[in-house]
Image (cartoon, coloured by chain):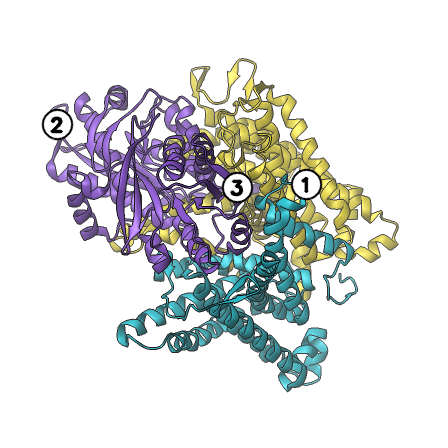
Amino acid sequence: MSSGPKSRWLTFGLFALGLALLPFLVDAGMGRSWVRLLDLALLYVMLALGLNIVVGYAGLLDLGYVAFYALGAYVYAWLASPQFGLHLPFWAILPLGAALAALFGVLLGTPTLRLRGDYLAIVTLGFGEIIRIFMNNLNAPVNITNGPQGINLIDPVRLGGFSLSQSHQLLGITFTGVHLTYYLFLLFTLAVIFISMRLEDSRIGRAWVAIREDEIAAAATGINTRNLKLLAFAMGATFGGLAGGLFASFQGFISPESFNLMESIMILCMIVLGGMGHIPGVIFGAILLTLLPEALRYTGDWQRSLFGHVYVDPADLRMLLFGVALVAVMLYRPAGLLPSRRRRREFADAEA
Amino acid sequence: MTGHKLGWMVVAAALLAGCGDKTQQHGDSPVVLIGQASPLTGPQAHLGKDNENGVRLALDEINAAGLTLGGRKVTLELKSEDDGADPKTATTVAQKLVDEGVVGVIGHLNSGATIPASKIYSDNNVPQISPSATAVAYTAAGYKTAFRVMTNDAQQGSVLGNYAVTKLGAKKVAIIDDRTAYGQGLADEVEKAVKAAGGEVVAREYTSDRSTDFMAILTSIKGKRPDLVFFGGMDPQGAPMVKQMRQLGMKATFLGGDGVQTPKFIELAGADAEGVVASNPGLPLDAMPGGAAFKAKFEAKYGQIQNYAPYAYDAMHVLVAAMKRADSSDPAKYLAELPKTDYEGVTGRIRFDAKGDLAGGAVTLYQVKGGKWQPLETVKSGT
Amino acid sequence: MDIFLQQLINGLVLGSVYALVALGYTMVYGILELINFAHGEITMMGAMVALAVAGALALAAPGLPGVLVLGAGLAVAIPVCVALGLVIERVAYRPLRHAPRLAPLITAIGVSIILQNVAMLIWGKQYIPFPAILPEGRHHVLGATISDIQVAILVLALLIMLALVMVVQKTRLGRAMRATAQSRQVASLMGVDVNRVIAATFAIGSALAAVAGVMVSAYYGLAHYYMGFLLGLKAFSAAVLGGIGNLRGAMLGGLLLGLIESFGAGYIGDLTGGFLGSNYQDVFAFFVLIAVLVFRPSGLLGARVVERA
């Protein structure tokens, strides 16, 4: 695709048009639940890109990333639900949630700077669990999080008079809540992608890669490894907090069980499966792993059309196939489905 | 990058190739779709499957008997989905059921999944009856489509707490919950009721719904010498808990809610189950007119009843009874009939209050005697 | 005092189970630098297979002494788990030995999901009761209670750990394992068959997991296809606490974690004046873990490995 600027603009235009029409195509072709899944997929793209900064760029294995997601979600729920009777607008809450998440990112980062790979993994895992346990238990003596019952009736995003939980007529076209949510999430996702791309090419991004490859050598060349690692944690956490706030508004109900360890592991799987440190790969991984378990619900239909009979309950088969897919992809594409050029080269070197 | 994007679209399209038949053919015998959602994978899969079987049994019966709505013979068809007991998946599943055009949903199993899903059913005007979600918050949200055929935590908890003090004669009570929406909700209500009845709560301890080791908290409780230990949680934790109590030489009565009042509990706890008291909403199955028959039918088809299958079965019948009264399977028409429900089900008389909660539901207390749950007493819940 | 002693016993029993499972993590890590996430599931498989055997025996030959039934269960569970461990290593990990570091982690997660779901398909979604075949004798020591099964767990765990240390310190295989852990390349130059050593490591770790699985399900009286996840997670934390890659570290970490959980749950309320309760016991455990790692970044007994690229 190294043709002239004109055809590049054309590709870009077609691509933008495709993104804009996608929810309608999906709705018409596959049903509204898939538009909802598309919304979720965008949410996971944001989360995966956030974690990608920590794991993919800076090489810090973080198994507690979901904590930041939870913080963002709870900040949103506290400030826009009957829990405290506050109903602030979303544009005021989202930055607050992201900022709080960033602060916690630094708080987590500071004591763990000396830890290497797997020790860091277990400490971050512990941090994630600690946040979840606090969310699950801070309903007494003072009720802050409503404990395991979760917080319900969280306000949907409102833009002017528009509520994103209702359908609106615009130019004769009906935009339902899930459609409008798609556009909002797409906007945020594009911003996150843009920031990630700029970071990757910046001095900071190159310094992170240097730290990932060899921390001692990086420090020797005058890179302030401490500040840069903290920055990675903070940046990653910011995206997590942002996604959390959007999730709370989208679902209208949050409870601590949505923020468990398995969620962190899934996000990690997304970036490794897609191609660590490589933005298109991460996006692909996030979308694939959000949609795959849902697509596997249809194995009953596949069985029926193949054998004329359902042998194994699709629900029983779904997670099994998901596990098989994880293993198979890693065996055949260990650097991810869409690895960056650098990764591919590293792998080729190791093989030789 | 564009190439990659195109790539994933192709992959996604290929993945989804098999899911075209989402709208059912309405031929001579129109098909009415009923949704069921519960965890069919994960740690609570056995309970989820139980709910599905309960719904399926009722649905098959209704089909076999023949259902005529608006002068046309209709066939019910079940769309059962796995929500994995996860709130996020529950909303996806709810949207999927709505998409497929179900006219009513029996589900979900857990409160945590039921609550976020109820918003989607409400937005799309699809009636929902949960056979087993007990959190007060479910119906407190005020959705007109939300019903349940099970007493909520407040109703059951107040009966349990009061019974512990006044009938079981417990002065000092220790309370443990599993920090799930169900366990914590029930335990908090029991605590209130125990205090209201003049009992003393000497210890409040916590565990998780994944634990099997309770020695540490039980040892700590043992030091406070309670007459009774209440556990808000499910049988996989309740059974080892009572075993460990006895192992530590604690003689206090073990009391539980409907999560404990299961045959599985006796199977898992073995000899230590003897003397355990637990509640379940409604009348004992054997005391109900159709109870024994239901049990025989269910067990012939699906094996032992786990817990909520009778409620799922009743919920299905309640839904269809409303359709019959409205003479239509259109939610816009039959939803208005649901609040007027007065149905003699396997689990008791089912009526709804203004919120969609089970009105005046009875709670029955059972005790394990001779390796079987024997009914002690049926108590009307106050609320 | 009796409560303190009881909590000590509780913690030690729980800790020895953690330690046995943690050994499997640490051995694999020591040699391959791989977190074998599927290890918890191997433990689960051990419990399930032993249960199936015990159930079959109860039907075929009722009245057999409990210890014999359990022995038969173990005798089948161990080879099955060993085979499983070897197959997993061969299929899911060996091809990825030179892949980017996180790739084997994902296959490990994938394998663990597969094992869980296979177990669910074979044994169903139910919790399965472990038959009460073991003597339930209880002994009273200074006001605390200890049961036969608890004594058996403590003794068995201790014996196995001693045997393992002997194997690693005194045998040819042990020497080869230590050499491989130091440097795979140099070891292979010295004539060590690295693949065989790694396979042996997986075999031993899986055998230990089988024993731990059977012990856990016999002790708590139930088994379930999901039981491996939490146990694996706790054991992995224990291994890291002790210094992952170090056998004695895994034992120490396991015992410590058991004690921390036990005393944490038992005393956290008194320690914080009732402000925090046993609902924060895991916070307490993770907090200790984090604190230890912040001051000793390689775990309690971990070697201070020079930072690798």
The vertical placement of A69 against A94, above or below, is below
Instruction: Work out which quarter of the rendered image holds the N terminus of chain C and state it.
Output: bottom right
Dot 3: chain letter: B
Q: Amino acid at mark 1?
A: Gly
Name the residue tied to disc 2.
B72
Residue depicted at 36% across the width and 25% down the height: B124
Residue depicted at 55% across the width and 74% down the height: C155
Q: Amino acid at mark 3?
A: Val
Whole-number angstrom distance, CA of label 2 to CA of label 1:
59 Å
Residue depicted at 62% across the width and 41% down the height: C276
Regarding residue A329, the answer to whether it shows in the image is no
First along the sequence among labels 3 and 2: 2
Q: What chain is the cyan one? A: C
Q: Chain B's colour?
A: purple
Q: Position of residue A209 (x, y in %)?
A: 75, 50
Disc 3 element: strand
Q: Chain A's colour?
A: yellow
Name the residue tied to disc 1.
A236
Q: Position of residue C227 (x, y in %)?
A: 46, 58
The label nearer to you, 3 versus 2, is 3
